[in-house]
Amino acid sequence: MAGKLMDAVQYSRHGEGSAGLKHGHVPVPTPKKDELLLKVEATSLNPVDWKIQKGMVPFLPRKFPHIPGNF
């Protein structure tokens, strides 16, 4: 049986606006002993996230697809 999946918006490439963004399903992460897993209903983007999307931070992300806020 496959593990549980969750919805995620990911950068598939650099781009402006919605270009390069895609909706997908990714495995629900397994928290480590000293971590918590929270259900998120809504979120915002940090300025560094849109800079990453535009390709203004060349060392981030190291590979695509990339989930914003997940380093």
Image (cartoon, helix red, strand yellow):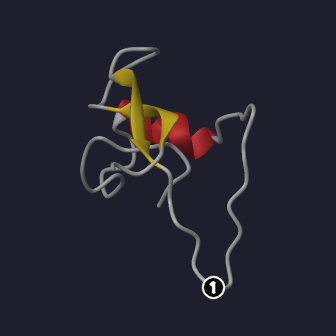
Q: Is residue 3 above or below residue 52?
A: below
Q: Position of residue 43 (x, y in %)?
A: 72, 35
The front one of 3 and 21 is: 3
When asked about the image quadrant of residue 59, the answer is bottom left
The single residue placed furthest to the top in the displayed view is 18
Residue at left offset 47%, top offset 61% = 71
Query: Is 39 displayed left or right of 63 in the figure?
Result: right
The residue under label 1 is 33
Q: Is residue 65 above or below residue 69?
A: above
Q: Amino acid at mark 1?
A: Lys
Q: Position of residue 11 (x, y in %)?
A: 37, 33
Residue at left offset 62%, top offset 39% = 47
Residue at left offset 40%, top offset 42% = 26
Q: Position of residue 19 (x, y in %)?
A: 35, 15
The front one of 42 and 19 is: 42
Q: Residues within 10 Å of mark 1 (few under 14, many from 20)?
A: few
The front one of 50 and 66 is: 66
Q: Is residue 65 above or below residue 59?
A: above
Q: Position of residue 17 (x, y in %)?
A: 46, 15
